Image: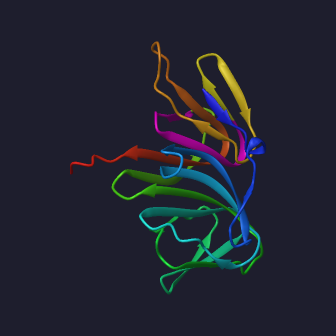
Amino acid sequence: MLVIPFASLQPQPWRNGGGSTREIASGGSAGSPDWRLSIADLEKPGEFSAFPGMERTFMVIEGEVAELTVDGAVRRLERFRPLRFDGGSAASCALPTGPCRALNVMVRSGAAGAGVLVAELSKKQPLALAEGQFAVLLQGKAEAAEGTRTDQLAPFDTVVGGAAAGGTHGVTVGGRGFAALISIFALDATQ
């Protein structure tokens, strides 16, 4: 079981100075990843960097509201409402209620796909994570478990899913609160 503590992630400033990003995980080549999972701190309104050939999913996870303008269309995004858009689009963000924090998932078109949803956590029915899945604790108290090992989670800690071994149920996340469940999967290039 792998738990990535949010406190261990080093912030990297954006090129435009409007915020910073903490990379949780990525896959593919280092110079040109097929996918990337990160948490961004948006400190002031401004333009987003363009990522042609990538599909982006953006979701406010702390703060009240962000207003994204993507190719001229304005979307008001409340907390825990993901928006998927083309990474090459002209995109900017307004922060009508102040700074916020957002989960970002980017996948290279044709190489990888991603799904993002918010799950309510339960102690009685923990969330099982398969290989290629990540759970980010958004709010509440939770723990990750695999076999007899358990780790307490702090807000924005990430649990990496894995294949079940030896008849166990694999990696699970249980507790009270909400988690973002992110599924990353490779696409078949022959289709």
Q: Residue at x 55, y 34 (%)?
A: 125
Please state which of residues 48 and 138 is positioned toward the viewer in this rendering. 48
Residue found at the far front of this picture: 31
Residue 162 percent coordinates (x, y):
50, 29
Residue 129 percent coordinates (x, y):
51, 35
Q: Is residue 23 left or right of residue 57?
A: right
Q: Residue at x 75, y 76 (%)?
A: 44
Q: Is residue 178 visible?
A: no
Q: Is residue 49 visible?
A: yes
Residue 34 percent coordinates (x, y):
45, 50
Q: Is residue 172 left or right of residue 157?
A: left
Look at the image and name its color scheme.
Answer: rainbow
Residue found at the far top of this picture: 166
Quarter placement of the N terminus: top right
Q: Quadrant of residue 2?
A: top right
Number of on-image labels: 0
Residue found at the far left of this picture: 191
Q: Residue at x 69, y 73 (%)?
A: 16
In the rendered image, the vertical position of residue 100 relative to residue 67, given as above or below: above
In the rendered image, the vertical position of residue 123 relative to residue 61, given as above or below: above
Please state which of residues 51 and 69 is positioned toward the viewer in this rendering. 51
Read off the magenta span: 125-142
Please state which of residues 96 and 128 is positioned toward the viewer in this rendering. 96
Q: Residue at x 45, y 14 (%)?
A: 167
Indicate whether residue 72 is drawn in magenta.
no
Please state which of residues 88 and 43 is positioned toward the viewer in this rendering. 88
Chief secondary structure of the magenta portion? strand
